[in-house]
Image (cartoon, grey):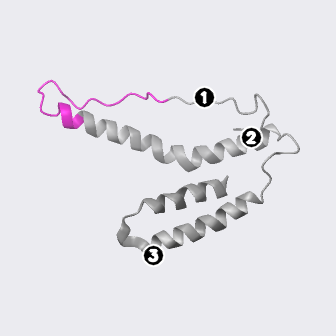
Amino acid sequence: MNLLRRIFVTSELLDAPKSRLGQRDFAIKSLKTQIQTLWKTEEVRAVRPEVRNEIRLGLHYFQSSLFEAVPQIYRRLQTGIERVYDDYDAYHGIQLPPFIRFGSWIGGDRDGNA
């Protein structure tokens, strides 16, 4: 899971402006190495993972993405509301209620896909 994340992050360097050609060459070389490493990992599990392993995997993705993304969504929406409604006399700093909810079926099917 860490390797897949590194491949994703490194692949974003390929979209860098052309003025950073050295960085692009580094990204391509790094991607080749990462993909070769991934190729040598176990793609199909011989044994079903235990529920605790699926929970650990799910928490990894939760920590690596949602802790950044959720506050960012709320900040952007709050900024948009303020930008649009700040000039209205009736606007008194509306605060966003929690509207994002999370659910999971981790461990429910025991297929290893958290």
Residue receiving disc 1: 103
Q: Earlier in the sequence, mark 1 or mark 2?
A: 2
Residue identified by numbered label 3 = 22
Please identify the dominant SS of the magenta region: loop
Give the residue number, with chain letter if any, for mark 2.
Answer: 54
Q: Quadrant of residue 90?
A: top left
Question: Disc number at residue 60?
Answer: none
Label 1 vs label 3: CA separation?
42 Å
Q: Amino acid at mark 1?
A: Gly
* Few, some or many residues within 10 Å of mark 1 (<14, 14–19, 20+): few
- Answer whether residue 99 is magenta in the image: yes
Amino acid type of the residue tagged 3 in the rendering: Gly
Q: Secondary structure at mark 1?
A: loop
Report the side of 8 relative to 20 (left or right). Answer: right
Circle 2: is it few (<14), some (14-19), or many (20+) Cα within 10 Å?
A: many
Q: Quadrant of the C terminus?
A: top right
Instruction: Calculate the distance from the C-alpha at mark 2 to the C-alpha at mark 3.
Output: 39 Å
Tell me the amino acid under the disc marked 2.
Glu
Query: Which residue does the image show at 47% across and 30% down from the upper left?
Result: 100
Task: Determine the image quadrant of residue 92.
Answer: top left
**Residue at the spot x=61%, y=46% of the render?**
61
Alpha-carbon distance for marks 1 and 2?
14 Å
Which circle, 1 or 3, is nearer the viewer?
3
Note whether 58 is above or below 94 in the view shown. below
